[in-house]
Image (cartoon, rainbow, N blue to C red):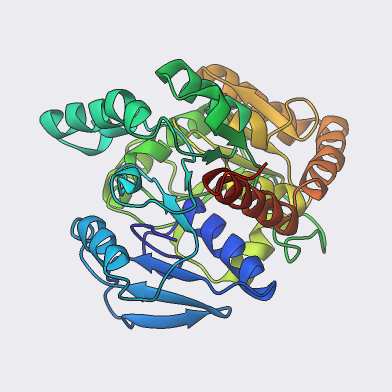
Amino acid sequence: MLAWRDLDDDEAGGSEIHAHNIASVWEQSGLEVTHRTSFSNGRPEIDVRDGYRVVRRGSRYSVFPRAAVAEKLRLYGRADALVEIWNGMPFASPLWRRGPRMVWLHHIHGPMWHMSLPKPLAHAGVALEEKIGPVLYRNQPIVTLSRSSEAEMLELGFPAENLQVITPGVDPGFSPAGPKNPTPLAMAVGRLVPVKNFGRLVGIWARVLDKVPDAELVIVGEGYERDDIEAEIAALGLQDHIRLPGRISDAELLDLYRRSWVATSASVREGWGMTLTEAAACGTPAVATDIAGHADAVDPGRSGLLAERDEDLAGALVDVLTDTGLRRQLEEGALARAAELTWQQAALANFEVLAADARRRAGRP
């Protein structure tokens, strides 16, 4: 598996959770898995996690050519199959890998390029993803997480016959337990970076407080936008209504999922919305932006509500926080939705894609 970061990285997110869980199930099933990624400060270059090997070498940029060279020279042994995790910058595996392979492309980054990079680099990123990528990967099996992300890829010209949707799972450790918070509590989880749009969520929460004055929002995560988000909270006088605890332990996160009345996200781009399905498994419905990824992670009207405009998102949050009958209905739907998603099913389906590519390359049906 080739990726630019792994689960222990300080900036790890949903993509890294996905890779870790698939690798863990494959390793437990008897496969030997190596996860090749970039160096992470304070962590060993060679590591073992849940039985699979992690190799951290190269910077955020040099990991791409170094990984290709390492595979060509078989520095870590001969791999029977390759999984390229395309998260913004591709490893260009079709140029140097001839054996069985597949790509995980969780979503098209679109506006994320211009939110994160200077204009010239952003234009180059868009061209790489939207113009060069569909041509370079035209004969490559590509797996994405949602139908909505698949639709975006089809619009860019990725061949339909090469695309397959395989939904992620939910760890069984996420489960309902204990009472909900006595007063309205909402939560949001993610890196504090532009694509997550937490600044927008702060403004939406100010609208919610007009109708639900005792409501509290907890935003979990760290990132370089923290100071800007805190400044926005202070400017709106919401210090008593929004908390930013930073990174919290797994036990604390689980407790927050269980106690919250609703999980929310104002993100502009997601491959799936992993935190929303983790919350759903704890019996907590979602209110989120109607974007690719969210449109599949959330079953609208069953496990949560989706909206586009700020006023509609605020209205949906108010509805869930104030209408007990609606909230109970969505809580039951959230549990049912999460029960449909397992990592064992996801791991098997992804392995079948690799097996099919191996048979095709060997000329077997």
Q: Nearer the viewer, residue 39 or 135?
A: 135
The answer to whether 351 is drawn above or below residue 290 in the figure is below
Query: Which corner quadrant holds the C terminus?
Result: top right
Residue 209 seen in this snapshot? no
Q: Provide residue 258's location: percent of width, then percent of height.
A: 73, 57
Residue in the picture at 63% in, 25% down? 306
Q: Is residue 96 left or right of residue 85?
A: left
| Residue 281 horizontal/vertical position (percent) | 76, 52
- Please give the name of the residue rendered at 37% of the width and 59% of the height, measured from the top-left corner: 11
Report the label total: 0
Q: Nearer the viewer, residue 283 or 13?
A: 13
Report the residue at 59% width, 39% height from top: 145
Quadrant housing the N terminus: bottom left
Task: State the image quarter where residue 178 is shown.
Answer: bottom right
Q: Is residue 85 visible?
A: yes
- Above or below residue 112? Residue 240 is below
Q: Quadrant of residue 117?
A: top left
